[in-house]
Amino acid sequence: MGEQQRVKFPQEIIDEYAALGVDLPALFSAGHLGTRMGVQILEAGPEKVVGTMPVEGNTQPYGLLHGGASAVLAETLGSVGSMLHGGSSKIAVGVDLNCTHHRGVRSGLVTGVATPVHRGRSTATYEIVISDEEGRRVCTARLTCLLRDVKQGDAPAPRPTAD
């Protein structure tokens, strides 16, 4: 969990942030909570965001993947997609998260895939499907983010996390 993995971004997004003097792949992270939970974002673009999270360390008292951990993975992936859809002039802020848990998982890695349901000027909604290592659906989530204009003092890009 200590090594920093570089995320695969579409070239046009890398170029957009580079024009602002920001090396997005070098700075990007899953945030402090995502890092603490072992979330790894593998691929990120406005059309699709893919990430993984270990079950170990993210379980509830019965030894199953905690529903809140699935929610963290879902909100992380949907927020990243919303941020990239909004571009460097917008900040994505989650306003609604819905998670339906389909099956329990006791070990291994879960993978989340976020795809857009709606990408507008002021909101973006993503469906996030979380599956186990056998490809069985564990959780289906939907996240809606408000896209607000960047204001003075807002960070132009995600900040790196401290290790």
Image (cartoon, rainbow, N blue to C red):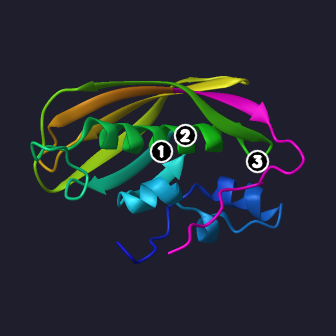
Q: Residue at x 63, y 44 (%)?
A: 84
Q: Which residue is disc 1 drawn over? A: 76
Q: Is residue 28 magenta?
A: no
What is the magenta segment's predominant secondary structure?
loop
Element under disc 1: helix
Q: Is residue 159 among the parts visible in the rendering?
A: yes
Q: Along the horizontal axis of the image, is 57 left or right of 120?
A: left
Q: Residues within 10 Å of mark 1 (few under 14, many from 20)?
A: many
- Point out the image quarter for the N terminus: bottom left
Residues marked 1 and 2 touching at CB (< 8 Å): yes
Q: Position of residue 100 (x, y in %)?
A: 28, 23
Q: Nearer the viewer, residue 46 or 89?
A: 89
Q: Which residue is disc 2 drawn over? A: 79
Q: Magenta part of the protein: which range? A: 144-163
Q: Along the horizontal axis of the image, is 30 left or right of 102?
A: right
Element under disc 3: loop
